[in-house]
């Protein structure tokens, strides 16, 4: 079968021929219609992911949407989402014409669902929605700060915060065009976080506090860590909750103990991979419903397998558009 293949860790995948998967008990064979690219795929493909990686050569992509070809659990022809259940982590992933999905790690989708949209709402959408709806639920009318708001995850988080009852949502990120898009989709204020050097009239902490108004944000979604997290901590309201889900700005943050204690903040870790499966499945179906009704919107670029290498490099460098392989 045709597939995206990582032949060596740290080297971008290329299209090639790869053995087709053989279904075993507890798994469903799908014809892949959409396989999103995610930062976790880049981490796995580089050998840097904390949970390890398959032996090369392997097929990447930790999630996929496809039509059922063979299954003991789903009707042939039904549309399912599979992700965060081992594909692309301990076995071949979804970036191919055919893929194996764990029955326990799959959920049937409405038949008229756009596969690329549903796939994009998996890793990225769930990482945006669940911190706000499940890990640290939005309180009616509160101020929410979304760091890293210029990517797909951040844009979905901006819209999710509004849907879940936030009174004020502030989007912070590096790319001006991404911030403009966040404002167009509901952000009440934006902060470009890379414009606050030593000569700036105010610090990033001051800018975030001003944008949030009042005592500062009471809920912060942080896929960045590093200096932006420290600045957000300084701007945060007493008793604020931080949901930490990534390290795009750096793996370390130097944080003053007194600031954490003095504000009595809660710092909560989050990863989709530690969420109960029933919670993931229910949240995905909720997101699909919102997207189908136009309440959550984001940009998707469908990429053929022949262009996987270039798409992989773009994903690794950071993109605002969601890149989805369409075998």
Image: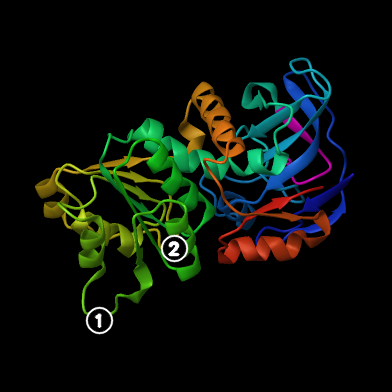
Neighbor class of circle 1 (other Cα within 10 Å; few <14, some 14-19, many 20+) is few
- Does 132 sit left or right of 181 as displayed? left
On residue 179, which mark appears?
2
- Does 326 sit left or right of 178 as displayed? right
On residue 306, which mark appears?
none
Residue 263 rendering spot, x and y as whole percentages: 13, 47
Can residue 175 be seen here? The reply is no
Residue in view at x 19 percent, y 58 percent:
234
- Give the residue pinned by disc 1: 198
Are the two marked residues, 2 and 1, in contact with CB atoms closer than 8 angstroms?
no
Residue in view at x 38 percent, y 35 percent:
164
Which range of residues does the magenta coloring cover?
92-101
Q: Main secondary structure of the magenta part?
A: loop
Q: For residue 47, what is the image quadrant? A: bottom right
- Does 116 sit left or right of 196 as displayed? right
Q: Nearer the viewer, mark 2 or mark 1?
A: 2
């Amino acid at each position: 079968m045709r597939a995206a293949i990582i032949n060596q860790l740290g080297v971008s995948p290329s299209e090639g021929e790869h053995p087709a998967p053989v279904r075993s008990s507890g798994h469903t064979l799908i014809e892949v219609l959409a396989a999103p690219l995610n930062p976790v795929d880049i981490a796995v493909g580089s050998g840097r992911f904390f949970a390890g990686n398959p032996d090369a050569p392997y097929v990447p992509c930790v999630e996929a949407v496809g039509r059922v070809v063979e299954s003991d659990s789903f009707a042939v022809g039904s549309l399912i989402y599979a992700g965060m259940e081992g594909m692309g982590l301990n076995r071949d992933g979804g970036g191919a014409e055919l893929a194996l999905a764990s029955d326990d790690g799959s959920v049937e989708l409405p038949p008229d669902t756009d596969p690329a949209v549903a796939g994009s709402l998996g890793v990225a959408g769930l990482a945006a929605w669940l911190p706000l709806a499940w890990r640290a639920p939005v309180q009616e009318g509160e101020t929410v700060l979304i760091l890293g708001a210029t990517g797909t995850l951040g844009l979905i988080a901006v819209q999710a915060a509004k849907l879940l009852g936030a009174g004020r949502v502030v989007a912070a990120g590096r790319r001006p065009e991404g911030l403009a898009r966040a404002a167009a989709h509901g952000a009440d204020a934006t902060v470009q976080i890379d414009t606050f050097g030593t000569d700036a009239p105010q610090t990033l902490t001051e800018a975030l506090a001003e944008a949030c108004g009042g005592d500062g944000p009471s809920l912060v979604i942080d896929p960045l860590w590093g200096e932006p997290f420290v600045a957000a901590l300084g701007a945060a309201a007493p008793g604020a909750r931080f949901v930490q889900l990534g390290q795009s700005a750096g793996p370390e943050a130097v944080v003053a103990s007194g600031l954490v204690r003095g504000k009595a903040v809660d710092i909560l870790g989050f990863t989709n991979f530690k969420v109960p499966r029933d919670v993931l499945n229910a949240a995905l179906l909720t997101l699909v419903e919102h997207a189908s009704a136009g309440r959550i919107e984001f940009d998707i670029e469908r990429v053929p397998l022949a262009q996987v290498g270039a798409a992989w490099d773009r994903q690794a460098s950071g993109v605002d558009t969601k890149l989805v392989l369409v075998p």
